[in-house]
Image (cartoon, rainbow, N blue to C red):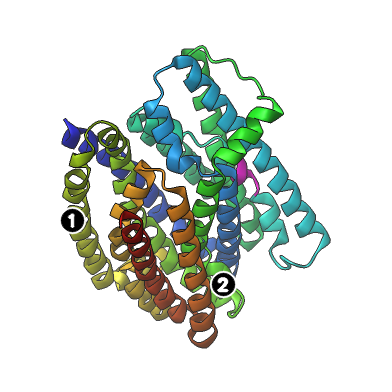
């Protein structure tokens, strides 16, 4: 039964990612060709900035929200939790959007791509409405796959018809965020009507409670996203837009593959939480079963991606770009190194070890930023690729040490 639940969840998440990969395979050549490498780089730079800020909007509930939903047996408590999480997220999205618009319009901080960034803020609202915490908790990942497929295919159709030249770069992220937001709004309307939930804005005290409750999970998830998604932002400090675009091409592939260990964590989290509540002695056996298989899977994915890197880049860009290929060879091992830490993350999440998670992710983020700044300064994108590999390994070591110390 436990294995079947994991396999079902993993297949749904894989289908979900399969849609993302399919859309990326079709969309990336279109965007790279129509925007040019410079504007493509700026679009990805803006996307990375908003993606990091969106983790503030998520506020850590993508980490422990599924567990909270799965362990709540009262329908009324679930309704109240859903309302409070969504309300908090929308509030945060509004506040961050205002700051982005003000900084983009009145400062030179984002000079050269301020319009792209301003139109990207809609992604924050898509994150506010992201239903993954609810669907994971309800063990209904098939519906997650459906909403993702619908939104991504809508996005694909929009860019095929509307993104024609470099002048259209400002609408790429806007179309992405709008597609997600529209589908998520329809999803929540359906869920609210089906479950007879009445949306009401919680009082200030309830919002304060949620902010305080998940603050440490928010801090740790923010640090984790810095480790994964800030690479392009760091590289932009030391490279031109052309190099940024070539690096972003390879980095896009690596980020898609980096989701494999995330899927394994998401697939196992609900059952791991229940086992931890009822049969704690079986937890290690359950985690090890999928941990070692995940390592084998990601290792073979890394080898296959590395060997086919030349053809992947040619397919995505329409030409042979040696720089992008060399970066992709390095980044292809990111998912394998990320998989090393998946068991640690699951243990931390099921036990809600906020202190360990917060400390480990911030130490890892600090190491990543320092190493990335140094290697990017001296070796550009290739140096950054090496730094990202080193950061994944360092994160695994840091989490392992802190967990072992806590067990002792």
* Residue 292's disc number: 1
* Residue 234's disc number: 2
Above/below status of 70 relative to 326: above
* Residue 72's disc number: none
Residue 294: x and y in percent read 22, 54
Q: For mark 1, does the 10 Å Cα neighbourhood hold few (<14), some (14 to 19), or many (20 or more) residues?
A: few
Q: For mark 2, does the 10 Å Cα neighbourhood hold few (<14), some (14 to 19), or many (20 or more) residues?
A: some
Residue 285: x and y in percent read 16, 46
Tell me which segment is drawn in magenta. Answer: 121-125
Residue found farthest to the front: 408
* Residue 120 falls left or right of residue 275: right
Q: Main secondary structure of the magenta part?
A: helix
1 or 2: mark nearer the eye: 1
* Residue 8 falls left or right of residue 259: left
What SS does tag 1 mark?
Answer: helix
Is disc 1 in contact with disc 2, using a CB cutoff of under 8 Å?
Answer: no
Residue 134: x and y in percent read 44, 30
> Looking at the figure, which quarter contains the N terminus?
top left
In the picture, residue 252 is in which quadrant? bottom left
């Amino acid at each position: 039964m436990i294995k079947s639940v994991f396999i079902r969840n993993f297949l749904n998440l894989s289908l979900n990612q399969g849609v993302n990969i399919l859309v990326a395979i079709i969309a990336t050549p279109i965007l790279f060709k129509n925007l040019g490498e410079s504007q493509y780089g700026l679009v990805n730079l803006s996307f990375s900035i908003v993606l990091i800020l969106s983790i503030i909007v998520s506020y850590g509930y993508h980490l422990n929200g599924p567990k909270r939903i799965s362990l709540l047996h009262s329908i009324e408590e679930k309704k109240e939790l859903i309302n409070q999480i969504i309300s908090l997220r929308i509030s945060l999205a509004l506040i961050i959007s205002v700051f982005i618009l003000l900084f983009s319009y009145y400062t030179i901080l984002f000079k050269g791509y301020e319009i792209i960034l301003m139109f990207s803020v809609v992604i924050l609202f898509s994150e506010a409405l992201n239903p993954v915490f609810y669907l994971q908790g309800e063990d209904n990942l098939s519906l997650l796959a459906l909403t993702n497929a619908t939104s991504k295919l809508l996005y694909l159709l929009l860019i095929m018809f509307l993104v024609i030249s470099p002048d259209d770069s400002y609408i790429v992220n806007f179309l992405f965020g709008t597609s997600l937001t529209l589908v998520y709004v329809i999803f929540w309307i359906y869920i609210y009507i089906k479950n007879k939930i009445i949306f009401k804005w919680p009082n200030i005290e309830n919002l304060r409670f949620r902010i305080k409750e998940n603050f440490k999970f928010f801090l740790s998830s923010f640090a984790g996203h810095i480790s994964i998604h800030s690479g392009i932002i760091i590289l932009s400090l030391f490279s031109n837009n052309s190099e940024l675009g070539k690096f972003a091409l390879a980095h896009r592939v690596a980020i898609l593959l980096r989701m494999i260990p995330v899927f394994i964590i998401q697939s196992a989290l609900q059952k791991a939480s229940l086992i931890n509540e009822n049969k704690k002695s079986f937890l290690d056996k359950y985690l090890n079963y999928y941990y070692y298989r995940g390592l084998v899977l990601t290792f073979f994915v890394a080898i296959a991606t590395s060997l086919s890197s030349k053809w992947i880049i040619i397919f995505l860009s329409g030409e042979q770009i040696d720089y992008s290929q060399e970066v992709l060879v390095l980044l292809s091992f990111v998912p394998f190194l990320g998989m090393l830490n998946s068991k640690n993350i699951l243990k931390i999440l099921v036990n809600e070890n906020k202190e360990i998670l917060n400390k480990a992710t911030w130490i890892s983020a600090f190491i990543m930023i320092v190493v990335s700044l140094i290697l990017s300064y001296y070796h550009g994108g290739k140096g950054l690729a090496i730094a990202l590999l080193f950061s994944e390994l360092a994160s695994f070591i840091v989490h392992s040490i802190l967990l072992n110390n806590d067990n002792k």
